[in-house]
Every structure is written in C-alpha cells, then in structure tokens.
Image (cartoon, rainbow, N blue to C red):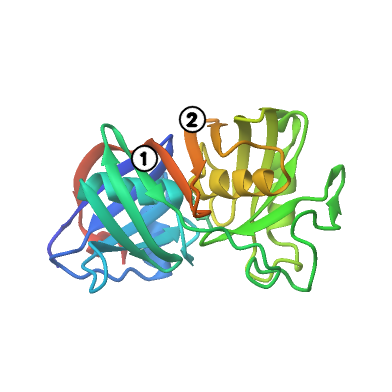
Amino acid sequence: MAPRSFLKMHGLGNDFVVFDARGDAFDPDADLVRRLADRRTGIGCDQLIVVDASAVATVRARFWNCDGEAVGACGNGSRAVAALVGGDASIETAGGLLTATALVGGASVDMGTPRFDWDAVPLAYAMDTLALPLAWGLLANPGAANVGNPHIVFFVADPDAIDLGVIGPEIEHDPVFPERINVGVAALPARDHMVLRVWERGAGLTRACGTGAVAAVAVAQRRGLADARVTVSLPGGDLVITRQDDGHLVMAGPAVIAFTGTVDLEDYR
Ligand SMILES: N[C@@H](CCC[C@H](N)C(=O)O)C(=O)O
C-alpha cells in the first residue's frame, strides 16, 4: 500500500489529521483512527477527518473522535474542510448539509438550526431542555441542544473554576445521555461575549469546540441571555456565532494548515 498524504490542520488549537480522499477512497476503522490520533505513537489529533467526493455537495466530510468513534458534526473541523476546499462550498456531513465560505485564515460555516427536543439531543427520557432538572455536585440545570452532535451547557460564574477534567467524563458517561454528551461550562460577561470551556465526548479537554460554541450560544439565546451575535472566547481563541433571521447559526473563525506529510498505513496495522 502506497504512503498516503495527510494535512495536519487546526481551528483554535482543536487539531485534526485530514485525509483528502477525493481521488483515492479511504475508510479507516476505529482502531486505525485511534492509532493515527495517538499523540505519542501516531500523528496526533483531537479528531480525524476524511474529505470525500459527494453526490449532493461540493465535498463530503466524515469526522471521528480520537477515541475512534465516528461523529455527526465537528464545527472547527468543518471550517478546516471549508478552508481546504476554498471559496463558497457545501459540505455533506452525517449531521446535515452545511454551507461554508472560506475567509482569509479561516472560514464561516452555516451550522443550521439547533434542535432542542429531548429525543433529538438525545436524552434517556423526556425533560425540558431549556433547563434540565439534573445536577452533578454544584453544576445544575444545564441547557441541552443538538447541533449535529449532542451538547449540554452549564452557566457558571467562572468556567476556569470548574474541574472539567474530573466532572466532564462523569457527565459524558451518565446513562441519562444514551449517545454520551459534550459538556460545556460557560459564563456570559456581556450579552455579546461568552467565555466557554468544553469537555468533548470522545476527545476530552480540547482548546476549542466549534459545535460547543454554537450549542452554548443557542441555549443562551433561547434563555434570553445573549444577543444575536456573540463572540465566544475559548482557551484557544475566539469564534463569532451569529443567529440569522432564519434561525440558522453561523460560526466564523480561524482554520489553518500546520503541516503536511505522508504516512505509511502499513505501519499502523
Ligand atoms: N471539536 C469538535 C467536536 C468534535 C465532536 C465531538 N467531540 C462529539 O463527540 O460530538 C468541534 O469543533 O465541534
């Protein structure tokens, strides 16, 4: 098997190994994803992305967490794909069809309309997703949304004061979330500014989570706490999330190539 080219990309430090498979099909299994994503023995990444040809869009993008599980959406990864493709593009994903525009040093992506029905999140049983009647220690009453993948967000005074590395995995694996969950802790110092940290399902603490930012803003707007346009400050930098008149949430921010390389997949069998 010939060595395969890859790009190492990131959006605000949320990093990706990207395979452009438009001319050469590639279907990694979970074990291969885990091996390539390993930061000591592989290339290393939070998520692996395969870009394919699509019958309905400019490209198809498939996303895997570094734990090997395929996921429906990745906001920062979608910007990376948009930056790679260039211009105006549509991106077919398991979480829905996205439209995107490449910008200098990044991209903006229309992430669609958030879903708030309890069974769309999904939750194990019917609950009000505006404020779930659930608590883990002092963290209580999170909002929930599905933006192509599932998220809950807690509004707190200081996200840095939360030991998200400890409580995040406990919440991620709680049986109330049948598909597990991404966990955000957010503060709103102003109606147009959010500070956010995210424990990502299948990837842990990352420097930024694009869908986490979209979901947190969606919940804050639904609670009447945020303006239509919100700058979200994550550990890796800022994203701007804008709710359009049609209810779609558009995410804008950086996406860059860190380096390119080739990998011999025989070494990962
Ligand atoms: N980092 C991503 C989200 C990746 C998927 C997520 N961990 C999940 O399991 O749903 C982003 O930028 O949105």
Q: Is mark 1 within 8 Å of ligand 1?
A: no
Q: Report the amino acid beneath label 1.
A: His
Closer mark to the observer between disc 2 and disc 1? 2
Say whether residue 123 is visible: yes
**Percent position (x, y) of residue 177?**
70, 66
Which image quarter is the C terminus in? bottom left
Give the residue at x 17% y 64%. 22
Q: Is mark 2 within 8 Å of ligand 1?
A: no
**Percent position (x, y) of residue 34?**
43, 59
The span from disc 2 to disc 1 (Cα, nearest Å) is: 13 Å
- Is 202 or 105 nearer to us in this picture? 105
Apparent side of residue 131 relative to residue 263 in the rendered image (left or right): right
Give the residue at x 24% y 68%. 26
Which image quarter is the N terminus in? bottom left
Q: Residue furthest front?
A: 245
Apparent side of residue 103 relative to residue 132 in the rendered image (left or right): left
Apparent side of residue 228 relative to residue 188 in the rendered image (left or right): left
Q: Report the amino acid beneath label 2.
A: Asp
Residue named by callout 1: 10
Counting residues from the start of the chain, the first of labels 2 and 1 encountered is: 1
Q: Quadrant of residue 194?
A: top right
- Is 185 or 164 nearer to us in this picture? 185
Q: Secondary structure at mark 2?
A: strand
Apparent side of residue 157 relative to residue 66 in the rendered image (left or right): right
- Is 71 or 100 nearer to us in this picture? 100
Location of residue 145 with respect to 178 vertically, above or below: above
Q: Quadrant of residue 94?
A: bottom left
**Percent position (x, y) of residue 212?**
57, 47
Give the residue at x 15% y 58%. 3
Q: Secondary structure at mark 1?
A: strand
The numbered dot on residue 238 is 2
The numbered dot on residue 34 is none
